[in-house]
Amino acid sequence: MRITGGKFKNREVFSPQDKDGALRPTSSKTRQAVFNLLKHGKFLSQVDFLTEEQPDILNGRVVADIFCGTGIMAFEACSRGATRLLLVDKNQQTLELAQKTAKKIGIFDICTFVRANATTLPAPVTQADLIFFDPPYNKGLVAPSLESIAKNRWLKSGGVVICEHSQQEKIVDFSPFELLDQRSYGHSLISILKLTY
């Protein structure tokens, strides 16, 4: 698996031998589509923290990757200008591989690795501007994890969550988040949410 754009384009990301199919990294095609949306999406006009002086949603931002797995979304964000990364997963093996990648590409010092269950997050070391959030499909984890993100203040007020979830896992109420945009990619939905308080 390789980073698809930015200053670390084509750098390899370590990934585990996934014999039981438990790990489902975001495909390179979906990653490129997501980062294209983050550059040009119409929803950007509704993102409160973007200004004329700092119009980029990634450049200079704190980005969290929850259910990070290999950390590929965080590393893609860093490649495109994010300056602080928070990587969260409950699996120690994948966190160690993400640490190995961070060391290999020279960004370990800007990363914080947290072993935690996303539905019961600890207090963050710092709040994120943007969160990538990719729970296992059809396990009922989207709503309780979003609740944990909001309750434990992982996201700044007005911050954005990019949630990848199954087409079958329809979410009616994202409260306290506002749905800004939603896109379909194969069996996946990308929901772009803004924290409303």
Image: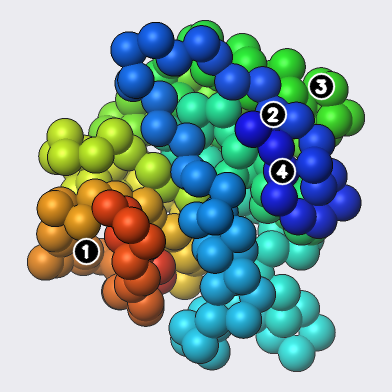
Horizontal arrangement in the rendering, residue 127 relative to residue 183 (left or right): right
Q: What whole-number distance in Å separates the C-alpha atoms at marks 3 and 1? A: 36 Å
Of pointers 4 and 2, the one earlier in the residue sequence: 4
Q: Residue at x 41, y 46 (%)?
A: 133
**Closer to the observer: label 4 or label 3?**
4
Find disc 2 in the rendering and name its residue.
13
Q: Earlier in the sequence, mark 3 or mark 1?
A: 3
The answer for how far apart the CA atoms under marks 4 and 1 are is 30 Å
User: Of the residues shown, which amino acid type is indicated by label 2?
Assistant: Val
Sequence-first tag of 3 and 2? 2
Of marks 3 and 1, the one in the foreground: 3
Q: Which amino acid, mark 3?
A: Lys
Tell me the amino acid under the disc marked 1. Phe
For label 4, the residue is 3
Query: x%, y% of residue 167?
Result: 21, 56
Res. 16 visible in picture: yes
Residue 147 visible in the shown view: no
- CB atoms at circles 4 and 2 under 8 Å apart? yes
Q: Give the numbered dot on residue 103.
A: 3
- Check disc 4 and give the amino acid type: Ile
Q: Quadrant of residue 89?
A: top left
Q: In the rendering, at what x and y percent does residue 19 appear?
A: 39, 10
Question: Measuring 39% from the left and 43% from the top, which residue is drawn there?
Answer: 134
